[in-house]
Amino acid sequence: MTTKQMRIASSVVDTIPMTARRLKVRPATMDDFDAMLTMKSDPGDVMWSGFASPPNPENYREWWATNLGNPTRMMFIGYIGSDPAGYVHFARSNGTNQFGITYGVAHAYRGRGVGTALLKSSIADVRKSCAVNPQFQAWIAVSNNGSEKACLKAGFCLSEHVRD
C-alpha cells in the first residue's frame, strides 16, 4: 500500500435529496462481482485507494464472497440503467455505532453527482437498518477534491486532522 496523506470526513446531516436522478442503489450481491472488480481496477480508483495496483481477481473474489455475508459490513452498488456507476462499503467498528466508508465512482460517471447520490442513498439504508444512531467516517486523500465535494454535499464535514 502506498502512503498518501488522508483527511477524515464525519457525517453530521441526514437529509437525502437525490442528485443523480437515474441512479438506482441497492445492496450488493455476488452477481455484482465483475462490475465491482472492473470499478476497483480502474486506474483512478486504484490511485485514490492508496493501493499500488488493482486487486488480484482471485483474492478479491474470495474477499467479496466472505464480506457479503459479514454482519459487520454493508455493501451497496449503484447502477444507471445497466451500467455500474459506483459502490459504497460500510465497515462497522467492533460493535459500535461507528462505520468506516469506502466508496468509488465508475470513471464514466465521475463529476456528475453520482458519488453524492450513492453516499446519501446508502447512508439512508444503513440508518434504517440500525437500532443505534450510526456515525460515518471516510478517509479522503487530501488532494482528492472530487471525493471531498461528494462528502460535503452528502452532509459530511471535513476535519483538519490529517494522517499519513
Image (spheres, helix red, strand yellow):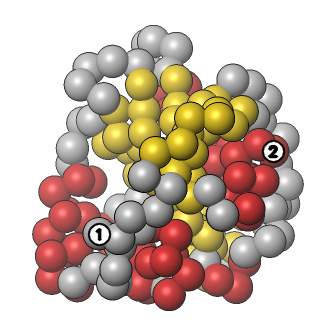
Relative vertical location of residue 64 with respect to residue 123 in this rendering, above or below: below
Secondary structure under tag 1 reads: loop
Q: Where is residue 100? Give x, y as percent.
A: 43, 39
Closer to the observer: label 2 or label 1? 1
Local packing at callout 2 (Cα closer than 10 Å; few below 14, some 14-19, many 20+) is: many
Query: From where the camera sits, is residue 5 visible?
Result: yes
Q: Where is residue 24? Give x, y as percent.
A: 66, 60
The N terminus is located in which quarter? Answer: bottom left
Relative vertical location of residue 43 with respect to residue 71 in this rendering, above or below: below
Residue 1's mark? 1
For disc 2, the marked residue is: 153
Viewed as shown, does residue 3 lie left or right of 10?
left
Q: Where is residue 17? Give x, y as percent.
A: 84, 41
Viewed as shown, does residue 14 lie left or right of 100?
right
Q: How many marks?
A: 2
Quadrant in the picture for residue 59: bottom left
Query: From where the camera sits, is residue 39 visible?
Result: no
Relative vertical location of residue 44 with respect to residue 151 in this rendering, above or below: below
Secondary structure under tag 2 reads: helix
Tell me the kind of residue under disc 1: Met
Contact? badges 2 and 1 (CB < 8 Å): no
Viewed as shown, does residue 66 lie left or right of 147?
left
Cα–Cα span, label 2 and label 1: 29 Å
Viewed as shown, does residue 51 lie left or right of 18?
left
